[in-house]
Amino acid sequence: MDSTAPLDKPVHQRLDASDAPADPTIRIAPSRGWTAIKLGELWAYRELLYFLIWRDVKVRYKQTVLGAAWAILQPLFTMVVFSVFFGRLAGIPSEGVPYPLFALAALIPWTFFANALGQSSNSLVNSAHLIAKVYFPRLVIPLASVLGGLVDLAIACLILVPMLLYYGIMPGWQVIWLPGLVGLATVTALGVGLWASALNVEYRDVRHVIPFLTQIWMFSTPVVYPSSLVPDRWRLLYHLNPMSGVVDGFRWALLGTGAPPGLPLLVSGAAALGLLLTGAFYFRRMEKTFADRV
């Protein structure tokens, strides 16, 4: 048979459905209006999430002398300052436990929240080189910033062991609540971080507002004082601040101070969930503008 003979049919007529590509063509277009959060898409990019978490952790301590020890030194030094000025000089009550332990039990979750909020609020602007070139769910970026802070939180918790042994306090069964309280702090940080990161793309003033907001938030949270100083009639309103429920819960779980979690913690949980849902939907609403404005 002559190899140069013409074929029976043109090429475009010989193709059938079996010759089509196995993967369908995906068209990427900006969303319109309020869009779904698409948790399935986040799960599909879970490897990217892991990579960004690991990248943030490494960058945070790159070219530092003490490395991850800063995760312990930050709450430790703050505890010393608070113990001197608020515990000794101001005489703020500590519900029958040594003030250093009283402060440290609150500073560990608060430091995680404050750092996670600061990192996530600037995460989109700091990742402009990725957003402008590659498509992936943008929710991955602030989520990685918040989850990366859990590594620091785990390291910081190591200081609690010698402190509890030094003061002769042994936590009881209440410690089983700690993972849930960490989850509440994570949800709160992510909810506020989604709002702040999306707003920071549009208004760069947000990066200057966040540190000021964090300072005010700390004094609106029972970090240096017990929540029992808040009048009873304002207690539920006070716990609309989700971090108040986290801090009170940490002290109760570790030191046995205060009342067991109840209605105040439910109020804090509902407020944190509200922040997360509204922040996620607002983030998705503004996501289509990130590549142009970042």
Image (cartoon, grey):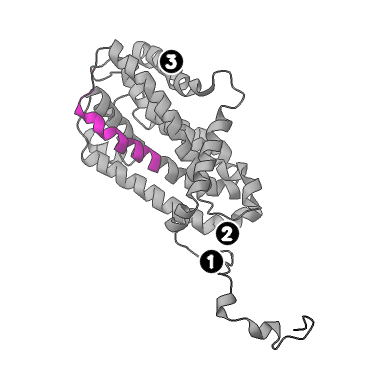
Q: What residue does disc 3 label?
A: 81
Between the C-alphas of marks 1 and 2, the distance is 8 Å
Q: Position of residue 194 (x, y in %)?
A: 48, 47
Question: Above or below — where is 272 with respect to 248?
Answer: below
Q: What residue does disc 2 label?
A: 288
Secondary structure under tag 2 reads: helix
Q: Is residue 216 visible?
A: no
Residue at 43% x, 46% y: name it.
191
Sequence-wise first label, 1 or 2: 1
Secondary structure under tag 3 reads: helix
Q: Which residues are magenta?
A: 170-187
Between the C-alphas of marks 3 and 1, the distance is 50 Å
Position of 21 with respect to 275 (left or right) is: right
* Residue type at tag 2: Lys
Sequence-wise first label, 3 or 1: 1
Residue at 42% x, 53% y: name it.
278
* Main SS, magenta residues: helix
